[in-house]
Image (spheres, rainbow, N blue to C red):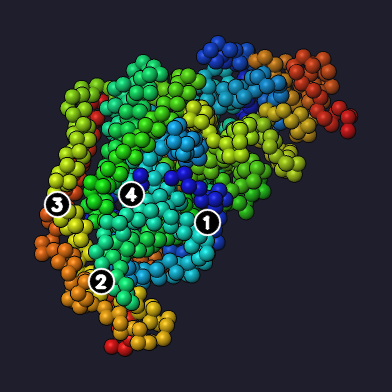
Amino acid sequence: MHMADALLSPAVGGTMWAVAAGLTAYSAKKLKDSPDESRVPLMGVLGAFIFAAQMINFSIPVTGSSGHIGGGMILAILLGPYAAFLVLVSVLTVQALFFADGGLLALGCNIFNMGFFPCFIAYPFIYLKIAGQNPTRKKILLAATLSAVIGLQLGAFSVVLETMASGISELPFKTFVLLMQPIHLAIGFIEGLITTAVVTFVWQARPEVLEASSRKTGLRGISMKKVLTGLALAAVVTGGVFSWFASSYPDGLEWSMARTSGSEELEAPEGGIHAILSSLQEKSAFLPDYGFRKAPANETETAMEEPAHWPAVDPGTSVSGLVGGGLTLLLAGMAGILLRRLSSGRN
Amino acid sequence: MSHHFLDVADLCFAYPDGTEALNGVSFRLEHGEAVGLVGANGAGKSTMLLALAGLVLPSGGTVNVGGTILAKNTVGEIRKRMGFVFQDPEDQLFMPTVFDDVAFGPLNQGLSLPEVSSRVRESLEGVGAAHLSERPTYRLSGGEKRAVAIATVLSMLPDILVMDEPSSGLDPKGRRLLIELLKKFTHTRLVATHDLDLVMEACPRTIVLHEGKVAADGPSREIFENAELLERCHLEPPLCMQGKC
Amino acid sequence: MGRVDPSLFSPSYAQGSGQSNRPDPRAFWIVTFAFVLTVTSFGKYEISRLTPLFFYPVAITTLYGVSARSLLRKALFVLPFALFVGLFNPLFDRQALLVVGGYAISGGWVSFFSITMRSLLAVTSAILLVMTTPFDRLCLGLEKMRVPRVLVTQLQFLYRYMFLLRGEALRMVRAHDLRAQGNKPKIALSTAGSMIGLLLLRALDRATRVHRAMLVRGFDGEVRVLQPLGFSWSRDGVFTLAWILFFALVRFVNLPEWLFGWVVGK
C-alpha cells in the first residue's frame, strides 16, 4: 500500500510532507513532555522487531497465498499513539531508503497513510474502546480486526486521493477505488487476525506487558465519544460519497484531471529519443519520416484526438483541485481536531 | 587507594512471585582483588550482579562501595565507580559505531569533547581494539564485541569491574586474550562465570554461591580441591584439575 | 514490503575510507530531495526530458567510487513493482499520442514508460544516498537539519538492532521449516502468531537489557552525540548548488530536443 514517487506530483507530495512533518513534530513534543528513558531502547528495538516480524511469511487461509504482518496496531498497543507513530516514521524511512518501498517524496504520504490512521484514529477510538479495559479473547479479536480494517481502508483511500490529485496515473477514480478498497478490506482482515494472534499470545504468556502498556499509554477521559466516532465514520462515508460523485460525472472528469500536466509538454516530446536514435544509427532518410509535430495539426489521427488533450480550461482549478484540496483539508482538519481532543482528553 | 572496597552485607532479594534469589549474601572485596563468583544456574549469580548495579531493589542487606551505601539517591555515584559488563555484548553495544559506544559513558559523565576522545582512545587501546574505532557495532566478531563491550565500561574509569560470563561464546584465541586482559587489569575485579579454568588462571580467590547463599569463600585452589563442596553445589573441578586429558 | 535485499544482511555500504572527501550528508539529503522533486515535476507524458537526469547516478557512482553494477542490481530489484504501478495506464489511455515509423503509440504507453523511468530515477537516488554515506552519518545530517532528536535516536537504534532481530526471525523460520512438512513448508497463521509473539517477547527482554546497560553507564534520558559534521561551503555548498542548477536546467530547458537539433544539424 505504499505510495510511489512515480505516481506523485510535487504539489501533493509536498503537501503531505508538510502534514507528516507536523504530526512528527507534534508527537516528538508530546513525548518530550512525558519523559521516560526506558522508551529509547524500547522504541528502537520494537522498530527493529517490525522488520523482523515481517520476515515471517504465513499462509493466508482459503487463498493459499502468503502474507506478513504490518505491525502498526501492535506498536500502538505497546507504545501508545505518539511513540508508535514515531516508530512507524522510522520504519517507513528505512523502508524507503533501503527497500525502495515508496520513495523519498512519497514518504510524507506514506507516513500519513500508514502512521496517522492506525495510531491516532484506529487505536484510540476503536481498539481502546473495545479491548482497552478487561480484554478478553473475543474483544481483542474484534478490536484488532476492526482497527486494522478501518485503518487500512482510510489509508488505502488516501492513496487513491493522492494518486488522483497528482494526475500521473491514468486509473479512473472509480476503478481505482473499486480496486483498492476491497483488496485492503481483505488485507485488513488478515492483519486483524494476525494481530489478534500475536496480542493473544503475549496476553497469555505475559499479561503484565499489556497491562503496563495500557497504564503508560492509556488515553483516559476522552469524553466526546460521539463526536469522534462520527468524525471517523465521516472519513469512510466521505470516501463513498466522493466515489459516487466522481462516477456520476462523465469521463470528461477523469480525462481532464488526467490530462492537465500533459498538455503543455506535447509540443516536442520525443526529441530526446530520436536524438539518441539518430546518433546511434546513420542519418538515413529514416529520420525525416519522424516529422515530429510542433503543432497539433500535422498528423490527421492525432489532430482528431487533440481537442481532448488540449482542454481550454486549466482543470487544476476545477475538479481535481477541489476534490484533492477539499479532502486534504478535511483530513488535515480532522487530524487537528482529533489531536486537540487527545491532548485535552488526557487532563 | 584503600577506599576501593566492595562490601556486601546480608543481601536478600526475592522475585515478585516469591522465589528467593538471594538469601543473605555477605562478602568483602579489597582494592585490587580478583575474585571469581561461581555457582550452578539459578544459584543467584546474575541476580546478585543486578543488585550490585542497583538495577533491582534488594529486600534486605546493604551494598557498600568505598564508603557509599547503595540507595536510590546514590545509584548514579556508585555506577561511576563500578563498571558492569553484562553477558550479551549485543545488549551493551547499542550505538552506531564503536567510538560512539565507548564514548557513551564519559559523555554521560559530562566530560568535555577532547577528554572523551582521549578516554575512548585509551580504553580501546587497553583492550587491543583501537583499530575498530570507526566500525559499526553490528559488524564485529564475537571476540571483538566482547573486547569493545569491556572498553565501553573501562572508559568510565571505574574502580571496580564486575563481569557476567565474559568468556561465553568466545573462541579459544578470544578467550585467551580475555584472560590476559583480566590478569593485566589493576581494578578490583568480580567475575561471575561458569568457566572454572578462567577462574583458576585469573582469579586467586573464589566465592561459591549456592541457593542464594555464600557456600564458600577462599583461595580458588582450595575450593576446587574440595570435592564434597563442589558436589553439594552442583559444580565440578576445573578441567585443568580433572586430569582427564 | 518484506522483499529482502540480501545485501542488507551484510551491508558493505558506504565503507569508511574516503568519507572526509565526500560531501556532508546534509548536502546529499538536499540534492536527493531536489532530484526527486525534479523527477516528479515533469508532466506525465515526458520521457525524453527525463533522460538527462540519469546523469546524476552516473556521476555520483563515478565520483565516489560506488559500484554502478551493484546500484543497477538494486534498482532493477524495484522494476517489477514499478511496472505494476504503471501498468494500468496503457489500459485506460488509448488515444494515440505519437507516431513512430508508421506505428501509433497511445498516450498510455508513453506515460507507462514515463512512470517506469520515474521509478528508476527516484529509487536510484535513494539507494545512492545509502550507498555513499553510512547510515549513522545520514542520521547525524538529519539531526543537524533540525529533525527531532527523538526521531534521530530512533532511527539509529532501529538500524542497529534490525540485523540482529531479523537474524533471530530467520533462525526461527528455519527451525520451523526443519520440522515442517513438504519441500516448501508454509507457516500457518496461528503458528505465525506465536512465532511473532515470541519474537516480540524476546525483543522486549532485549530492550530491558539494553536499557540496563545504558543505565549502568549513566544514561539519564538524553543520548549525547560526539561526532561533529563539518559543512564546508567550498565542498558541500558547491556540490549542492551545482546539482540544483543542473536539475533546474534539465527541468526548464528541453535538453534532448536541443541535442536532437544539434545532431540533425538545424
SS at mark 1?
loop
- Label 4 neighbourhood size at 10 Å, few (<14), some (14-19), many (20+)? many
SS at mark 3?
loop
> Residue A250 bears which disc, if any?
3
Rendered position, A252 above or below B173 = below
Residue type highlighted by circle 1: Tyr
Q: Are marks 3 and 2 on the same chain?
A: no
Rendered position, B36 above or below A333 = above
Q: Are marks 2 and 1 on the same chain?
A: yes
Looking at the figure, which quarter contains the C terminus of chain C? bottom left
Residue C82, x across and y down, in percent: 39, 56
- Label 3 neighbourhood size at 10 Å, few (<14), some (14-19), many (20+)? few
Q: What's the distance in space between the residues labelled 1 and 4, CA to CA? A: 26 Å
- Label 1 neighbourhood size at 10 Å, few (<14), some (14-19), many (20+)? some
User: Please, which chain is the residue tagged with disc 2 on?
Assistant: C
Residue B129, x across and y down, in percent: 64, 49
Q: What's the distance in space between the residues labelled 3 and 1, CA to CA? A: 52 Å
